[in-house]
Amino acid sequence: MEVIEARNVVVGAGVVGAAAAYHLARRGEAVLLVEQFGLGHTRGSSHGATRIIRHSYADPNYARLMPRVYQLWHALEAQSATPLLTRTGGISVSPPGVPYAELVEAALVELGVPAQRLSAEAWNQRHPRFAVPSGSTVVFEPDVGILAAGRCVHVLLHEAERHGACIQPNTPIDRIELETSGVALLGKGLRIQADRAIVAAGSWIPILLPALAQVLTPTRQRVVYLGTADPGYGVGRLPVFIWIGAREEQAYYGMPDLDGRGVKMGRHHGPATNPNQADERVDEAYVDELRGFLRGFLPELAEAPLAATETCLYTMAPGEEFLVGAWPGRSDLLVAAACSGHGFKFGILVGEVLADLATGQTPMAGTERWGATLAGFLQG
């Protein structure tokens, strides 16, 4: 059996694990980052071309963190001389009786982020491609944008490595054991003895840490790309859109064509899944459902040909909260389930929080609730 001794071991090379390794390495910490698959794989939650970034949150606790998130992504762009964020503008929309858009507006006003509230009729008049249902509320935020997801992860890994991190792909961890001093991470023919472990394994967290199996639910998210030659659906013409209806399953989002693949669109919720059983199917019924929504929102786009489909994993926690913090009673085991389908944009901040916790620093105010939520679930 191969035995490796390490100061800090990060499990999972998605956006959160890559960001944790990046922040730790920049502080001069020795870091070993292990990933069960190849780097940039398509089995988890961080692959693909694009993710939405926005201040527009109905929950002010998350909205208040977004200025720091934007700051960190812009800093990484500057350090790496690599464009990562494309500003597109975006709308948050909800029908009568659903307060989502009004709550978004309130959060933006509190932050002092520029935004404009419009009626459905006013929005449709300005943007004739839209047919937002009458009575709906539209809140437009100019600073909404798109992160180049795969590129973001690649740059984080590159910068982590440049600052001294060791990255080891194709290294599955099957079991984690808490010892009197330190943490043992066990794989086939491998034992890693770590002073500190950071588990950022996404949908595999409840497998590695079974105490969270009743808390975290992996789900399969399905997205489609609708192809159109109309430049009106590209960046600078079509904004990101988020629609929140009266029922949980009435949550749809989309973003403009960034790279010629088409307009990306999906529903926020998906079926429960086993992350060890890869399933990239996107059935016709689901595509028809998305087209049905578009017929009452962006009717011309509803008839656009299907250009491609894609799947990824969500790891859902109750209330769509993040669970980020130390294992109760153990400062040498940190967990990062920063997920629930809205975590990518926060990845670079979650990595900073993990590095703070690992090195005895005080994380950004407002993030301590993530650790309290984790402890609350684990301690009953």
Image (cartoon, rainbow, N blue to C red):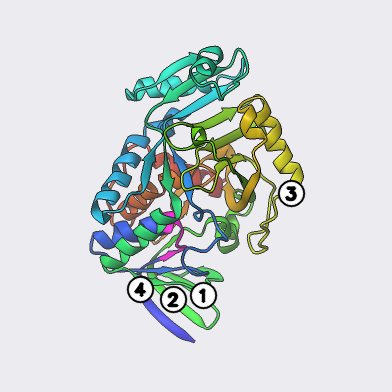
Above or below: residue 280 compared with residue 183: above
Can you see residue 305?
yes
Q: Earlier in the sequence, mark 4 or mark 1?
A: 4
Q: Which residues are magenta?
A: 10-17
Q: Earlier in the sequence, mark 3 or mark 1?
A: 1
Q: Nearer the viewer, mark 4 or mark 3?
A: 3
Q: Which residue is mark 4?
A: 6
Q: Estimate the spatial distance between the alpha carbons at disc 4 and disc 3, rounded to whole Å.
A: 45 Å
Occupied quadrant, residue 67: top left
Residue 109 in picture, x, y percent from top left: 37, 20
Number of residues whose C-alpha sits closer than 10 Å to that of mark 3, classed few (under 14), some (14–19) or many (20 or more): few
Q: Nearer the viewer, mark 3 or mark 1?
A: 3
The spot of residue 228 in percent (x, y) is 57, 40
Residues 103 and 243: in front is 243
Residue at 32% over, 23% down: 112
Q: Residues within 10 Å of mark 1 (few under 14, many from 20)?
A: some
Q: CA distance from mark 2 to mark 3?
A: 41 Å
| Residue for badge 3 | 283
Q: Secondary structure at mark 3?
A: loop
Q: Which residue is mark 1?
A: 186
Tell me how far mark 3 sits from mark 1, CA to CA.
Answer: 38 Å
The residue to which callout 2 is attached is 192
